[in-house]
Image (cartoon, grey):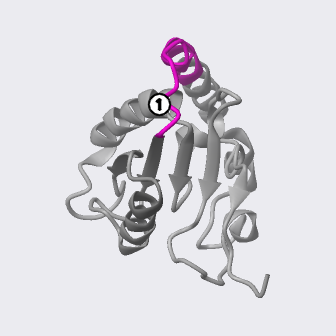
Amino acid sequence: MKKLAIYLLRFGLNFIYFFFKLLPVKQNKVLFLSRQSNELTLDFRRVQEELKAQQPYAEIVTLCNRLEGEQSGGLVHFAVTTLKSMYHMATSSVCVLDAYWPAVSILNHKDSLTVIQMWHALGKIKQSGYQTLGRESGRSAEIAHLMKMHENYDYIIAGGKA
């Protein structure tokens, strides 16, 4: 039953997204999506400050929604935020994430959208993504596959000498 619900969710969101994708892309629009906090995170603030310094005409849109914990707004609020994110993904040229955002992974995006995963700590070194599957801190492999977790990223920022 869970599989069917996920397939229906994916189909429904892609159906809605199809119509959003008919809208034109704004070449200077950059979308930031965070599930780490309900407010602009320090990492995003620093990246946005540098982006504004280098590209003063960039249109920056930020959606922050922590699904868990106090002041999260709950599942309904996250669903509304997801719909907003779908509109902005369809009309942005770049999308920057600091965590897994389901709509980014399960939707079929325009080729013009570049998705950058910077995780939620600039230059961090920790286990994340598929490394946590099946562990207490991670998801089940089956759910990860059905939700296409961590798919559709064009670039991933990670700490390292290079």
Please identify the residue farthest to the bottom as the structure is shown.
Answer: 161
Quarter where residue 79 is shown: top left
- Residue type marked 1: Met
Locate residue 48 relative to residue 105 in the image: left or right.
left
Q: Nearer the viewer, residue 58 or 46?
A: 58
Locate residue 37 relative to residue 33 in the image: left or right: left
Instruction: Name the quadrant of the N terminus.
Output: top right
Q: Could you say where residue 70 lies in the image, as x and y percent from the top left?
A: 22, 64
Where residue 135 appears, as percent x and y from the top left, is 68, 72
Of the pair 125 and 76, the residue shown nearer to us? 125
For this orientation, the residue located farthest to the right is 162
Indicate whether 49 appears above or below 64. Answer: below
Image point (62%, 66%), residue name? 138
Residue visible at 77% across and 88% down in the picture: 161
Is residue 26 shown left or right of residue 145? left
Query: Residue at point 36% right, 74% down?
Result: 42
Where residue 95 sits: x, y (%)?
A: 54, 46
Please tell me whether mark 1 sits on a helix, a strand or a loop.
helix
Residue position for label 1: 86
Query: Of residues 39 and 80, which is closer to you in this image?
Result: 39
Task: Report the magenta residues as a range.
Answer: 13-28
In magenta stretch: residue 21: yes
Going by the image, does 98 lie left or right of 71? right
Badge count: 1
Establish if 62 lies above or below 6: below
Where residue 114 sits: x, y (%)?
65, 43
Crowd band around label 1 with a 10 angstrom C-alpha radius: few (<14), some (14–19), many (20+): many
* Quarter of the picture holding the C terminus: bottom right
